[in-house]
Image: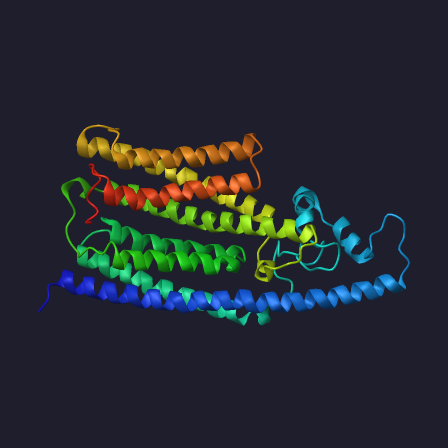
């Protein structure tokens, strides 16, 4: 008969496998929603364009009014500085990205067509909730088998980090309709689970003495949550670049070749939301750095020792600090801000993969 820790470890691996499978089906459902909904919106756009042309042919055009009076009035009704700032990107109910036809528009606040038409999205969210529940069971059984919190090595960090990323995504869905991020967030979670199982698998075991401290719970839990938020902003920044390119192409009359991006807010909306989430994650990463230094003093008798892991944790802090400063005070907006956010996340990935695997130091206890 297997010891309890090995048994729980096997259960944990089974739950992780089932969670990955459920996430894969959810990923397909999210992608299906993007494809199906973009077709629905295009049909609505074309119909609206036909009605607008017919109205323009019947009603004289007054001075100072565009080809479609309804469109111009919708623009004039946008209230507040945020609405004025986002007017060029076009909302579903108001301005358009191509001069009034509606083709190329974006979903800034929420999808205005009937919610019941987005059956694939609702199925995808339900599957994501199911996958997260199974994933949580995998994390908990790993913790029971190890007799400690399950983030003492790269395998545990990746599996727990993937769960936190999905959980944060689901929590945000309660307040805002970010289902357009589902394909990207769930896709990243699948990649993390596969990488954990294939490249970083570590059997259940005890921690090295340096990790046997309550600071493990404090330091690493904040790092996991911050990394999960950085994952969301990475997806938003990548979408921002695609959306910005699409909006420029449509404005130049080049046509809308990325129909699925109709479900995604404007580049400006994505940038603003990414900035706010990055600000929260940056605060968490600051505490990660501070608590890591305190833990280092408790474990090794010094707050800072220029260990590779410590250096890259500080590099990440500097990159995101530069991002927040440049955007807030130096006018680094648009694609420059998006690229800086992406560079910050690439530093996070480098820190938790390459540094752990190829650089020796006091933090080389990931079980690789």
Q: For this view, does 251 lie left or right of residue 16?
A: right
- Does 155 appear above or below 81? below
Residue depicted at x 65% and y 66% = 42
Residue 151 seen from this side: no
What colouring method underlies this structural image?
A: rainbow
Q: For this view, does 128 lie left or right of residue 257?
A: left
**What x and y, as percent, mark residue 9?**
19, 62
- Who is closer to the viewer here, 344 or 286? 344
- Who is closer to the viewer here, 16 or 172? 16
Residue depicted at x 34% and y 43% = 350
Name the residue at the front extreme: 254
Residue 141 seen from this side: yes
> How many callouts does the rendering have?
0
**What x and y, as percent, mark residue 336?**
53, 39
Q: Quadrant of the N terminus?
A: bottom left
Name the residue at the left extreme: 1
**What x and y, as percent, mark residue 118?**
56, 69
**What x and y, as percent, mark residue 63?**
89, 49
- Does 364 appear above or below 130? above
Residue depicted at x 89% and y 55% = 61
Q: For this view, does 315 lie left or right of residue 337?
A: left
């Amino acid at each position: 008969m297997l010891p309890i820790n090995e048994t729980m470890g096997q259960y944990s691996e089974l739950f992780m496998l089932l969670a990955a499978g459920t996430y894969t089906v959810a990923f397909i459902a999210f992608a299906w929603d993007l494809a199906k909904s973009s077709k629905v919106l295009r049909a609505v756009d074309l119909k609206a364009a036909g009605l607008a042309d017919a109205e323009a042919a019947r009603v004289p055009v007054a001075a100072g009014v565009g080809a479609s009076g309804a469109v111009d009035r919708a623009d004039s009704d946008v209230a507040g500085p945020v609405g004025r700032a986002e007017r060029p990107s076009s909302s579903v109910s108001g301005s358009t990205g191509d001069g009034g036809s509606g083709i190329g528009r974006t979903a800034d606040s929420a999808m205005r067509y009937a919610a019941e038409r987005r059956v694939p999205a609702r199925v995808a969210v339900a599957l994501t909730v199911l996958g997260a529940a199974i994933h949580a069971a995998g994390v908990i059984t790993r913790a029971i088998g190890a007799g400690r919190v399950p983030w003492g090595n790269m395998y545990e960090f990746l599996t727990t980090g993937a769960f936190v990323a999905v959980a944060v995504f689901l929590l945000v869905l309660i307040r805002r309709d970010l289902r357009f991020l589902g394909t990207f967030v769930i896709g990243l979670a699948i990649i993390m689970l596969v990488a954990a199982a294939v490249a970083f698998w570590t059997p259940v075991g005890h921690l090295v003495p340096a990790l046997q401290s309550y600071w493990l719970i404090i330091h690493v839990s904040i790092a996991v949550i911050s990394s999960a938020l950085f994952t969301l902003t990475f997806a938003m920044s990548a979408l921002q670049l695609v959306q910005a390119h699409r909006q420029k192409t449509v404005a130049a009359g080049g046509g809308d070749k990325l129909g699925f991006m109709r479900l995604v807010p404007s580049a400006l909306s994505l940038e603003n939301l990414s900035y706010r989430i990055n600000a929260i994650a940056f605060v968490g990463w600051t505490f990660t750095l501070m608590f890591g230094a305190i833990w280092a003093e408790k474990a090794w008798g010094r707050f800072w020792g220029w260990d590779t892991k410590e250096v890259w944790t500080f590099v990440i802090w500097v990159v995101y600090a530069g991002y927040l400063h440049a955007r807030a005070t130096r006018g680094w907006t648009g694609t420059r801000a998006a690229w800086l956010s992406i560079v910050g996340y690439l530093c996070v990935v480098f820190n938790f993969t390459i540094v752990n695997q190829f650089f020796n130091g006091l933090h080389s206890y990931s079980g690789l």
